[in-house]
Amino acid sequence: MEFLQQVINGLALGSVYALIAIGYTMVYGIIGLINFAHGDIYMMGAFFGFFAASKFNLPFIPTLAIGMICAAVLGVAIEKIAYKPLRNSPKLSLLITAIGMSLLLENGSRLDFIFGPDYRTYPSNLLPSQIIKIGALRLDSLHLIIILISILLAALLQIIVFRTKVGKAMRATSFDKDAAALMGINIDNIISITFAIGSALAGAAGVLVGILYSRIDPYMGIMPGLKAFIAAVLGGIGIIPGAVLGGIIMGIAETFTKVYISSKLSDAIAFAILIVILLIKPSGLLGKKSNVKV
Amino acid sequence: MPLLEVRNLTIRFEGLIAVSDFSITMGEHELVGLIGPNGAGKTTIFNMLTGVRTPTEGIIQFAGEDITRIKPYQITKKRMARTFQNIRLFKDVSVLDNVKISFNFRVKYNLFHSIFRLPKFFREEEEIEEKAINILKIFRLDNKKHEMAANLSYGEQRRLEIARALAASPKLLLLDEPAAGMNPQETQELTELIKWVKNEYKISILLIEHDMKLVMNLCERIVVLDYGKKIAEGTPEEIKANKQVIKAYLGDDADA
Amino acid sequence: MIRNSLKRFAIFMATSIIIFVILTFIINQNIINQYDVRILVLICINIMLALSVNLIVGFTGQFTIGHSAFMAIGAYAAAMLTINLKLPFPLSLLGAGIIAGFIGLLIGIPTLRLKGDYLAITTLGFCQIVVVVIQNIPQLGGAQGLTGIPPKTTFAWTFFTMIVTILVIYNIVHSSQGRAMISIREDEIAAEAMGINSTKYKIMAFVIGAFIAGVAGGLYSHYMMYIEPQSFNFLKSMDFIVYVVLGGLGSIPGCIISTAVLTYLPEGLRGFGDLRMVIYPILLIVIMILNAKGISPSKLFKRKSKGRDKDAIA
């Protein structure tokens, strides 16, 4: 019973990681960049939601929406300003810029005239946190709602990617950017849309985490960002279902490590998983080996 | 004992059979051509011979040794060298250094000698420099020895590809479309050069080419590939007259 | 060939000695204050680290973004050797390098099979694991850090080791081993086709880089007298990557200069207080964008030969 409860906890954490991981994987799939600033977009989403809820007393759904929309705008802006000029540069340069952007977001947020270095506490009335009893199981409604919302958002994403023209264009671009351009697809727009969607999902994760754990601070994106990234790699970088699978596995692994082994090692387990997957199957659980033409 | 013996070579990529049941034998001092339409599997055969791809079935024996599954650099050490269809020079490296790299696996000084600049280092480096320049002279590239490979003209780059492979002192040299993109005069010069190299260095050469004039002039024997299968083998005259070959390939050729 | 080589060596050593004498004079006469001496020492240490990363990333083309792990290993190992085993300082440094190099070998063998981004992520993960492991070892001071490291490092030590490092890196790069590494960077498949065992040379570059980083770490811990695990996390690794990329991958002089400038920069920005850590990344992003548009300081050092081969031996 305890076990099942921990599974639910792990799933809730995993859903958060999955939402962030999807953004990583979409961006990598389309421009081959590991967007180190993505974890900080998650953080910014949490803060945007916080201000919506505390300063304007908005209820849950508008708060979530504002967190997502503002994060999306931020993501698109970052792409246009910092990543687009380097689209044809060596990968290492892009990586460095992304890291610079991450530092900028973190330290910029800490400035007094932005968010300030102190942590903030989310208003506690946004989502119901009640214990639901199912037989001998005692589950927190918060966890269940988070899992539900993540499933909803992921389902929405699936519809967009597989049932709309825009989604088709996104898939085409991630297969072969140049060919897609030749087919008349506006690559710049597609890339912006990809960043917008990925950032929106990260923003959603930020708001959900803010509600779940109450405390948010400018550095909150670093570890989850890294772990979500590992999740994306675990599932197969560039593959959206992989990101979801990876996120869930990471969430459950971390929860179980905290509960059954030691909470100090819960961070290390993430990196251990990374190393193992890269040594055994670098293309990820759902990934395919790519053949290089010689 | 033949220099190269290939038996029943087959390679499958997921569902596609790229090369099927390919066999060939080559002796020392032979010049053999491998022709066939685009996509017939010629470069794939080169890749299998040089260890870049592992065949699904079949055996490759070189100078009596089974080399079917060993790594590319080990095959080069056994004296088989190749050029690439899409030139793979070391672009940001000088012409001279491109050639020097092929001497690496025979260098006897180690890291210690390099770091402390011991006499052995200088001795061998001078030898390598001399040998490398000599090879460049043969390919008329010695006046460009300090140029970055990326700055050479296309024809010069193709020559450098061959020079670099030759510097590895192969017994068998695999040339993958060495005349691609060359004009008739350059092709003629290349034909003479390849003939000269074969005789001077006493090596065997296996050549993939689409330029029929070069193939017919140069090769003692020709093997024809179509859809991964060998469809004919013989002298240039025999191949020219072979109906199957004409049907598959020669009929469309503009150079013949 | 030997004559040219000796000539270059003599010029380099003469210049280095002159610079050293001038700097030592300036330090001893207190023309610059202790704070600036610290910057000089850090510059020397960082140049060693940047060059070690450059060997792996710039010359061999392998994306290692977790190199600070080896600096950490060296820093802590040297400290332990000096404090617990009471080894003389030079032996501690050597020991630190050997231990770091050995761990580099253990890590390098499985991970250098990976390419590009995957290698980058693995080295990053390794770096973070090292930090976490150190945090959980009480004998190393844990997360609070290690204090009581004797102040053995002087400016002379760091300058001297830096000069040796420059010589070693230069000699390796301009040798057959160096040519092999560069060929792997340029085109690994073609390198293998020319008889180069690419795995061997990748590991060679990696281990040498780890060794140098270990020695630099040892110098660092015996200068700072106090070290803590978080200062060696992947952000530190990224510092080195930035020095190397901005100095021009595969350029030794470019790397030296960019490291010196970029080590000084955050210190020079100290007057801006909190804004410093905002200005620094903004500058970084701006420089990367300018770099992409072709405007770059590293272009000045990029060796495009015009007649005289600067890449040839001796």
Image (cartoon, coloured by chain):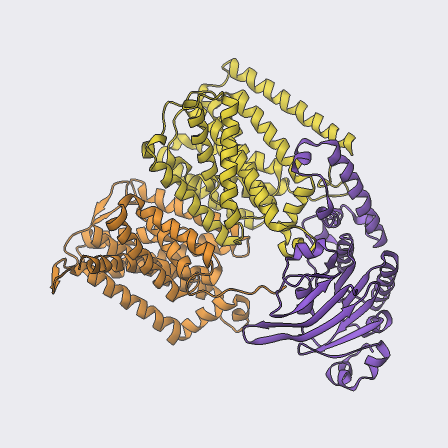
Apparent side of residue A263 relative to residue A271 in the rendered image (left or right): left
> Residue C85 appears at what percent x and percent y?
43, 23
Whether residue C268 is situated above or below residue B150 in the rendered picture:
above
The chain painted orange is: A
Query: In the rendered image, which quarter is residue C151 located in?
Result: top left
Foreground residue, B62 or C19? B62
Apparent side of residue C184 relative to residue C89 in the rendered image (left or right): right
Apparent side of residue B55 relative to residue C229 in the rendered image (left or right): right
> Residue A294 appears at what percent x and percent y?
63, 63
Whether residue A290 is situated above or below residue C61 in the rendered picture:
below
Which shade is chain C?
Answer: yellow
> Residue B57 appears at what percent x and percent y?
62, 71
Q: Report whether residue C49 is seen.
A: no
Q: Report whether residue C271 is seen.
A: yes
Apparent side of residue C11 relative to residue A116 in the rendered image (left or right): right
The C terminus of chain C, quarter of image: top right
> Residue at left 12%, top 59%?
A131
Which shade is chain B?
Answer: purple
Whether residue B144 is situated above or below residue C73 in the rendered picture:
below
> Residue A238 appears at what percent x and percent y?
44, 63
Foreground residue, A268 or A280? A280
Query: In the rendered image, which quarter is residue B3 located in?
Result: bottom right
Whether residue C104 is situated above or below residue B46 in the rendered picture:
above
